[in-house]
Image (cartoon, rainbow, N blue to C red):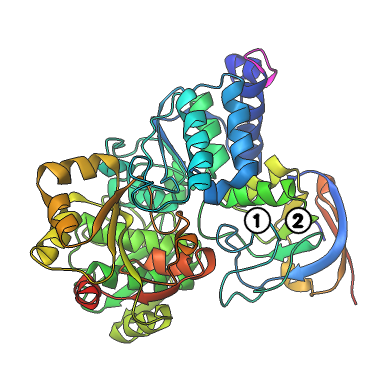
Amino acid sequence: MHLTKEEEKIFDGEKGEVMSRLFRLLVRLGDIYGADKMIPVGSVQVAGVSYKSVGDPGTEFLEDLASKGAKVKVITYLNPAGMDLEDWEKLGFPKDFAKNQLRIMDAFRSMGIVVTATCTPYLAGNLPRFREHIAWSESSAVSFSNSVIGARTNREGGPSALAAAICGVTPNYGLHLWEKRQPTIKIKVDADLNFNSDFGALGYYVGKQVKNKIPYFTGIKDANTDQLKALGAAMAASGAVALYHIEGLTPEADLVKKDGLETISVDKKEIKETYDKLNTGKDPDIVIFGCPHASLREISTLADKLEGKHLKKPVWICTSRMVKEAAERMGYNEIIAKAGGSVVADTCMVVSPIEQMGYKTTGVNSGKAANYLPGFCKQEVCFANINDLVEGQL
Amino acid sequence: MKGRMISPGKAEGVAIVSSEPIGFYGGIDIKTGIVIEKGHPLEGKCVTDKILVFPCGKGSTVGSYVIYGLKKNDVAPAGIINKETETIVATGVILAGIPCVDQVEIEKIKDGDTIFLDADNGIVEMKSV
């Protein structure tokens, strides 16, 4: 890989040991994947924020970087933390967990990272433009920014994204290159997709089938950004899909080559079977929406459904701090709280220690959450649409 | 067999082979090295000190930290062989210092084979059981 004179100095340690170590990681990745050079990134999003995900090894890694004075060069956002960073005590998050989580946040803050904690940075003030090179790591946000916005990022690991933030560059390979953004499989959809959970089920099914390919969808007539967020998140969780195109809906769909591709058909039957497969439990102890983090529209929809109602069992909706603030102004949070539910910011069901909080069965409308909850939170899952889930808790 | 070096080093161990991709985050327990993903072909098996063979990574990008954590907790695999190593696994093995090679015909490796992995030269040698 070609390095500029300036970059060679960083590599050789003239800009300090930390920069050198992180830059070497990027060069190594660039060499493996055949990058010709480094390219500047417009923004970064770092995964590996929850104490539950990174544990003590990750915490020490981050504190080590922070203590050596590492600073980010571009706007950098964070993935969800393991708890609501303000209301954690009220929501019942364990104290020792909180202590470790706050250590992690301190380390990030001292590196100049915006302590946002959301998997939907694009809804919270970190919005790339079409064709902008970025280095993001949250798999659903990678999918959204590549597919729905048309920005360009590989699926970065937490540490490689952090390295990109601190060095301000990323190796030029993979999805940064136009020829690598061409679809490699066609998905013909013939099913009514109404609820966000339908898009989650479709995504879960397709992710399993195509693994790390680039799907080109036909037959999806319409979808709003909440539904595209649900689709992409599920495909990135059950498979490793970092980019998809949808005929008529996503910005690169008309520009890519899609002739002669293998085609998979998905109809009602596959969607129904996916719902059945993801349902491993009954009668949830808790229902959690907002995976990926809820938009203001999703919170507003839930508030409508809960207005004047009384919940028998808890309902959470997870979101970013920014969206929670807007929901507060609109009175949605109050409506949800009056019904007995909670708008939870900064965290989500997958990265929070819900199994330590006594929950055994969780209801979700997210294909991504349904994918992770059994393994990572030891939960039985009820996967359903928002109407059925809310009704079940009343 | 000859592959591509992802992360340098040499390792010897018994192969544990998955036909399915592995998502380290939520897929492997960071404290024990046991596969915890429900329905995964390796569910319940331990990857510690083994040569872990799988086609490619999948799922969460936090997987890199899990690989790094497995090493710090002394429960990491001795080496990793992939068909195609993607960034998440590559970052994890480079940080953790776990020898790793990809672009190998992993179909030829069977569970229980003794593997000698010379990642520096991209070489995989195996002794079948």
Task: Specify the quadrant of the image occupied by residue A17.
Answer: top right
Neighbours of disc 2 within 10 Å: few (<14), some (14-19), many (20+): many
The one nearer the camera, B79 or A119, is: A119
Residue B5 appears in view: no
Seen in the picture, residue A248 relative to A270 is either above or below; the reply is above
**Mark closer to the chain start, 2 or 1:** 1
Q: Most prominent secondary structure in the magenta stretch?
A: loop
Q: Which residue has dot 2 on it?
A: B75
Give x and y (percent) for residue A126: 31, 35
Secondary structure of the residue carrying numbered label 2: loop
Q: Are marks 2 and 1 on the same chain?
A: yes
Q: Which residue has dot 1 on it?
A: B30
Q: Residue at x 63, y 18 (%)?
A: A10
Residues at circles 2 and 1 in contact by the CB criterion of under 8 Å: yes
Q: Is residue A18 magenta?
A: no
Q: Which residues are magenta?
A: A11-16
Seen in the picture, residue A283 relative to A352 is either above or below; the reply is below
Give x and y (percent) for residue A193: 22, 73
The one nearer the camera, A94 or B114, is: A94
Q: Residue at x 16, y 68 (%)?
A: A310
